[in-house]
Amino acid sequence: MSRKQHKGHSDLENIEASDIEALETEEQDYRKSKSQIKREHLALQSLAKQLVALPEKQLERLALTEKLSKEILAAKTFKKTALKRQFQYLGALLYSEPVDALQIQEQLEKINLPNQVKTQRLHQVESWRDRLIEGDDELLEELFNNHENIDRQQLRQTVRNAQREKSKDQPPKAKRQLFKLLMTLT
């Protein structure tokens, strides 16, 4: 039995050139370049390094698969080249496992946030201390205005002592005292 050919056009013949270009454009949007894939894998390897650096208690808080958790714990025992290969493997696991790498990254940022805030605070206090020792009277007045409970006489005396130590190249005892005093303000 032979098939009877229908007169008319098939669906493929009805597609115009503009439709084909639109389909090709959509197809290209879904395909990732080799470079983009490589960047994503490197980002996942970086995430794997951060996960390996975490203490076990913090790892338990993250939403990781059992296999991924096991491999991260194993990576903690590896050295040099084996560790590098393990990071690559963990990156591939993060890519293939049903885990949300963005969610894990957000959880890591939440874990690290208190440390970042503390570091920022320390840098701020160090900056204040150095500026006060250099003679920044505007900062001194700003501190007095913003922190009413501060002992003005003690702060001024500690700043003078730190300035005197610096000019005489003495050990920084007053500089440390000034730092501790400023830490109480934040």
Image: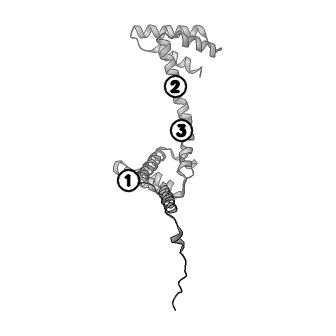
Name the residue at 56% across, 44% down.
106
The residue lying toward the viewer, choosing from 38 and 107, is 38
SS label for mark 2: helix
Q: Which residue is mark 2?
A: 122
Up the image or down, 135 lies above or below 104; here it is above
The residue lying toward the viewer, choosing from 22 and 6, is 6
Up the image or down, 155 lies above or below 20; here it is above
CA distance separating discs 2 and 3: 16 Å
Name the residue at 56% across, 35% down.
114
Name the residue at 44% across, 56% down.
92
Position of 11 with respect to 145 (left or right) is left
SS label for mark 1: helix
Q: Which residue is mark 1?
A: 85
Q: Earlier in the sequence, mark 3 or mark 1?
A: 1
Q: Which residue is mark 3?
A: 112
Q: Amino acid at mark 1?
A: Arg
